[in-house]
Image: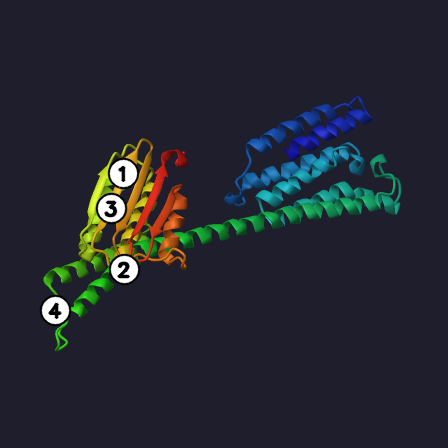
Amino acid sequence: LFRFFTIAMGVGLHVAREPEFPVGLDIFMGFVALFAVARVLVRPSPAGGRSVPMLGMLIADIWLSAALVVSTGGLDSPFLIYSLVPILTASLLMNQLLAAISALISIAVVAGGHVIGAVDVGDLPWILDGNYLAVSLLYSAVCLLCAQLPFLANLNWHRRLNSVAVGAERGRLRREIHDNVAQTLAFLSLKVKRAEESATDEGTVRVTPRDMRDIAQSVERAYLTIRDYLDGADDEEIDRPLADSFSEAVRQWSRDTGLPVRIRTSGIQIEPSPYVRQHLLQIAREALANVAKHAYASDVSAELTGDGSGLVLSIRDDGRGFSLDGPSGHGRDIMQERASLAGASLTVDSRPGEGTSVTVEYNDSMER
């Protein structure tokens, strides 16, 4: 836009000053306009680095802009602002060194002759007549600013994007580790505590073969989860229906904890995206993990129901509950964060001595 705007502005100013173009200038300006179109269509990627075609295009850009300015009046040229275009291009799409070189070349070609003319070294062409020292200094300063400021602004924006990306990745790892590895270790801790509670007066701990098998499976799941993180793999079955994944996750929780749970899935008419499904499943796992760690419940239910284009996931228990006025725990914050990322709403209802219910409501129109 800046390239075409400065060309159009230069043509308008030139026509206002001289209605007729000198012989050959109209052809040259047409060539510059065609090059501008090609320069925009063959725009290089900032991540592509330096290459011979990019450098060739930059050299041609500098030469054409300088020639256009010199042939139409130098520092008096209506196309003077257009000579900043290659400098901005190098600053934004290439690197700081090339931008500085482009600026120095433009300064030398466009302003250099006027500075020599101001020194009065003898007979010079008409374009170099007059004292243009102040204008030359101003033009030089603008060229150098165009070489530095866009690059620094681009660099600062790139760093901000990297910072946001790193923060998002840390948040993802925090959620994944908490929702998988930490929960598995919590189940292992629960098994160990139960084994300690069964210790005899002599201090002998009695562990059944089933307990040993459950502990071994939990350790293996933690190992596989960590290995998947290192390999960049995702253990979720992307093509598996949400109802099946939900039921299997709840049954696995029941096997790990030894707590019975009632499972119900009905009326499901939509299948959310893998991204949303992942968040919904992890919310269910976290809610169940909190039941095992804190609720001391005897009755637990897990339901996934549908109504047209919506889904309702709920985990309820008859445990000891807690006060919602107190500080929210790490797990509750992560559930809320996951619900927001999935475009769903999360409701936690609990009172001391009256159990807890976690409800997630999702509508596929939120995702669209």
Amino acid type at circle 2 is Lys
Res. 17 visible in picture? yes
Name the outermost residue toward the top: 20
Q: Quadrant of the N terminus?
A: top right
Find disc 4 in the rendering and name its residue.
Answer: 206
The residue labelled by disc 3 is: 302
Could you tell which of marks 3 and 2 lies nearer the N-terminus? 2
The mark closer to the camera, 4 or 3, is: 3
Q: Secondary structure at mark 4?
A: loop
Q: Which residue is mark 1?
A: 305
Q: Name the secondary structure under disc 1.
A: strand
Mark 2 in CB contact with mark 1 (< 8 angstroms): no
Name the residue type under label 3: Ala
Disc 2 from disc 1: Cα separation = 26 Å
Secondary structure of the residue carrying numbered label 2: helix
Q: Which residue is mark 2?
A: 293
Which comes before the other along the chain, label 2 or label 1? 2
Left or right: residue 315 versus residue 157 is left
Looking at the image, is mark 4 or mark 3 earlier in the sequence?
Answer: 4
Q: Is 185 above or below relative to 203?
A: above
Asked if residue 314 is positioned above or below residue 180 in the image, the reply reads above
Q: Position of residue 187 (x, y in %)?
A: 24, 60
Label disc, if present, on residue 21 of the rendered structure: none
Tell me the CA gap for discs 3 and 2: 17 Å
Q: Marks 4/3: CA distance?
A: 32 Å
